Image (tube, rainbow, N blue to C red):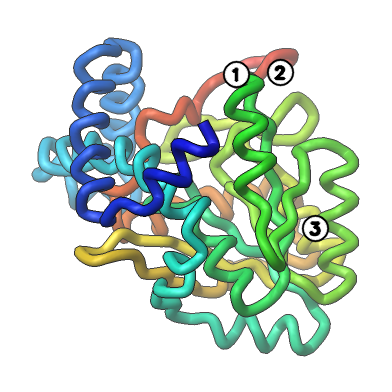
């Protein structure tokens, strides 16, 4: 499989994206559960909050999101196996992150399930070291591929367990950057229930705890697909409350609210079929 990925990485990006569009529609047509989760999440998003203004074009967003979901798969060979792709990405808003790193504060980069999020840490690693939190895949073949192809120069991966948290903490204390998916459902004991598009979602508390412990600033990093490649847009999260001493529940809710605003920037590129509202094993469902 690794050899196949390396072969596919040599194909032109338009061809990989064409395959992705086809794959996205095939998956959509074959899985009723997949369709139901995506439609339910998108419907929730346009009922209120930042995306309420998009209600009139929900069908258009849905159609585009189907194709973008397929691109998540077919772009991976190019992202993981062709280092030149990351070098070609245009990055906007990088300077504030570099200033925080130069000051020894570290930086926390939050990349939601939107666009080519696998590319974000690889593009950042061209400039500075970064350690990224990941949850190992259950399937052995996929897990082996991720462990073999994800790490690269200046890019370390930290498992989503106690040892991985220690890796992230050490990186921040060295004045380096870390990255994670803020909308990934955490395991029992690692999250809190907080509103996400007006519905309770079990949300990771790790970014908040690390920011409060180390004083590292939090940045949003979106890797958006463009006509001929990708564009990374970075902006610092500046909540209306004092993040350094805010109650954890308030800070986590604020993070989800900020995430909604990030998704509003390109809702057609968000992975709506991700089961964001699932109840993890051992966690009590919200009232």
Q: Are marks 3 and 1 in contact (CB under 8 Å)?
A: no
| Label 1, label 2: how far apart the Cα atoms are | 6 Å
Residue shown at the point (75%, 24%) measured from the top left:
188
Which residue is found at the position 49% from the left and 30% from the top?
276
Q: Residue 226 versus residue 151: which sits nearer the camera?
A: 151
| Residue 210 numbered mark, or none | 3
Question: In screen coordinates, is 276 left or right of 168?
Answer: left
**Mark 1–mark 2 contact, CB under 8 Å?**
yes
Say which element carries label 3.
helix
Spatial separation of the CA atoms under disc 3 and disc 1: 24 Å
Residue 179 point in image, percent of width and height: 65, 58
Image position of 31 with respect to 229: above or below:
above
Q: Is residue 246 left or right of residue 203?
A: right
* Residue 79 makes an appearance in the image: yes
Query: For residue 222, what is the image quadrant?
Result: bottom left
Checking the image for residue 279, the label placed there is 1
Vertical comparison of 57 with 126: above or below: above
Cα distance, mark 3 to mark 2? 22 Å
**Residue 31: percent from the left, percent from the top?**
29, 13
Label 2 residue SS: loop
Q: Secondary structure at mark 1?
A: loop
Residue beneath the point at 34% across and 65% down: 230
Whether residue 251 is visible, yes or no, is: no
């Amino acid at each position: 499989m690794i050899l196949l990925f390396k072969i596919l990485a040599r194909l032109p990006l338009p061809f990989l994206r064409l395959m992705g569009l086809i794959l996205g529609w095939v998956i959509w047509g074959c899985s009723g559960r997949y369709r139901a989760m995506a439609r339910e999440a998108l419907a929730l998003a346009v009922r209120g909050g930042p995306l309420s203004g998009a209600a009139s074009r929900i069908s258009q967003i849905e159609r585009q999101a189907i194709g973008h979901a397929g691109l998540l798969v077919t772009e991976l060979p190019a992202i993981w196996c062709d280092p030149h792709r990351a070098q070609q990405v245009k990055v906007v808003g990088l300077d504030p992150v570099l200033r925080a790193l130069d000051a020894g504060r570290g930086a926390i980069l939050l990349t939601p399930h939107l666009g080519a999020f696998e590319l974000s840490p690889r593009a950042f690693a061209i400039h500075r070291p970064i350690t990224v939190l990941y949850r190992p895949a259950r399937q052995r073949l996929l897990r082996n591929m991720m462990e073999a192809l994800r790490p690269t120069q200046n890019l370390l991966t930290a498992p989503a367990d106690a040892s991985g948290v220690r890796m992230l903490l050490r990186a921040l204390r060295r004045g380096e950057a870390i990255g994670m998916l803020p909308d990934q459902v955490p395991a029992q004991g690692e999250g809190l229930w907080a509103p996400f598009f007006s519905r309770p979602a079990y949300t990771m508390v790790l970014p908040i705890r690390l920011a409060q412990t180390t004083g590292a600033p939090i940045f949003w990093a979106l890797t958006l697909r463009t006509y001929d490649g990708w564009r990374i847009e970075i902006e610092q999260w500046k909540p209306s409350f004092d993040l350094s001493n805010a109650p954890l529940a308030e800070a986590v809710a604020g993070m989800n609210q900020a995430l909604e605003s990030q998704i509003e920037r390109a809702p057609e590129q968000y992975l709506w079929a991700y089961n964001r509202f699932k109840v993890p094993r051992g966690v009590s469902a919200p009232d």
